[in-house]
Image (spheres, rainbow, N blue to C red):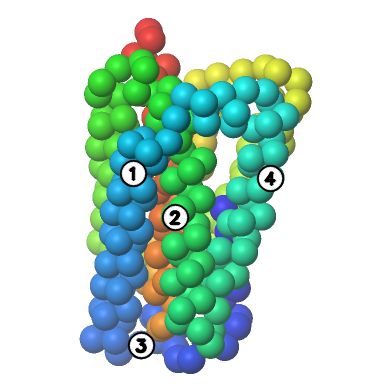
Amino acid sequence: MSQIDYTQPPDHPLFAHEAEEDTRASFIKKTYTHLFGAIMLFAALEVLIFQLVDVAALTNKMFGTGYGWLIVLGAFMLVSWIANAWASSDNSPAMQYAGLGLYVVVEAIIFVPLLYIASQHGENIIQTAALATLIIFGGLTGVVFVTAKDFSFLRSFLMFGMVAAFGLIICGLLFGFSLGPIFTVGMIVLMSGYILYYTSNVMHHYRIGQHVAASLALFACIATLFWYVIQLVMALSRD
C-alpha cells in the first residue's frame, strides 16, 4: 500500500482534526464522494473491458507464467507510486485527478484475469465477494467514525505485514508454490487494518484539500481487500 507524506505543505495548512466542524465535514464528504466515483469508474471499466477485449487471451498472457505475473506486479507497483505522487500533488488539481484516474485504470486491468477466473467458477462468486467487501469496509468505517479513535499507531505493524506479504508472493511466483487460504485470510486481515488506518487518517491526519489522495488510499485498500475476498470465496466454493 502507498504511504502519504503528511508533512508536505498543501494549499490549506490544517489537518482534518484541526479544522472547524463544517470544513472537516466537507473534506470527509469530498473524500467519500471521490471514493464512490472511483469505485463506479472501476466497475464501468471492467464491464467495458469484458465486452471489448478477449479476456481469456489476456488472462493467459498475464497469468501464463509466474515470471509474467511478476512483471505485471512490478509494473503495477511502479504505476501505483506514480499515481500516488500525482494524487498527492499540492499545486495541480488536474494532476491529482490524473493520479486517481490512472490508479483506477491500472487496477481495472490487473483485475481482469482474476475476475475472468472467478466467473468460470460460478455465477455468484464476484457478486458475493463484492457484497462481502462492502460489508467489511462499511463495518470498519463505522467503527472508526463511531469511536473517533486514531489508528495511526498501526502504521509500523501494517508496513511490516505488507513487506512480509510481498516477500511471500514473490517467493511463491519464483518457486511455484501456492500460498493457500491461510495467506488469503491473513491478507484480508491486513487490508482490514489498512482500512482502519486510512479511515482514521481521513478524520485526523490528512490535510484539508487532500481529499483526492485520501480517496485513492481508501480505494487501494478496498481493491486489495476485494482481490483476496474473491480468492477466499472461490476457495470456499470449491469445498
Please identify, in this view, whether the residue under mark 3 or under mark 2 is nearer the observer: 2
Please identify, in this view, whether the residue under mark 4 or under mark 3 is nearer the observer: 4
Label annotation for residue 104: 2
Q: Residues within 10 Å of mark 2 (few under 14, many from 20)?
A: many
Q: Earlier in the sequence, mark 1 or mark 2?
A: 1
Residue at numbered disc 4? 74
In the rendered view, would you say 64 is above or below 12?
Answer: above
Farthest residue in the top direction?
Answer: 239
Q: Nearer the viewer, residue 67 or 233?
A: 67
Residue 145, x across and y down, in percent? 28, 63
Q: Residues within 10 Å of mark 4 (few under 14, many from 20)?
A: few
Residue at numbered disc 1? 48
Q: Earlier in the sequence, mark 1 or mark 3?
A: 3
- Residue 47's image quarter? top left
As helix, strand or loop, the secondary structure at mark 1 comes to helix
As helix, strand or loop, the secondary structure at mark 4 comes to helix
Residue at numbered disc 3? 19
Residue 115, x across and y down, in percent? 40, 31
Q: Residue at x 60, y 81 (%)?
A: 7
Please identify, in this view, whether the residue under mark 1 or under mark 3 is nearer the observer: 1
- Are dots 2 and 4 in contact, CB under 8 Å? no
Q: Residue at x 46, y 38 (%)?
A: 111
- Residue 74's image quarter? top right
Q: CA distance from mark 1 to mark 2?
A: 14 Å
Q: Nearer the viewer, residue 206 or 101?
A: 101
The amino acid beneath tag 1 is Leu
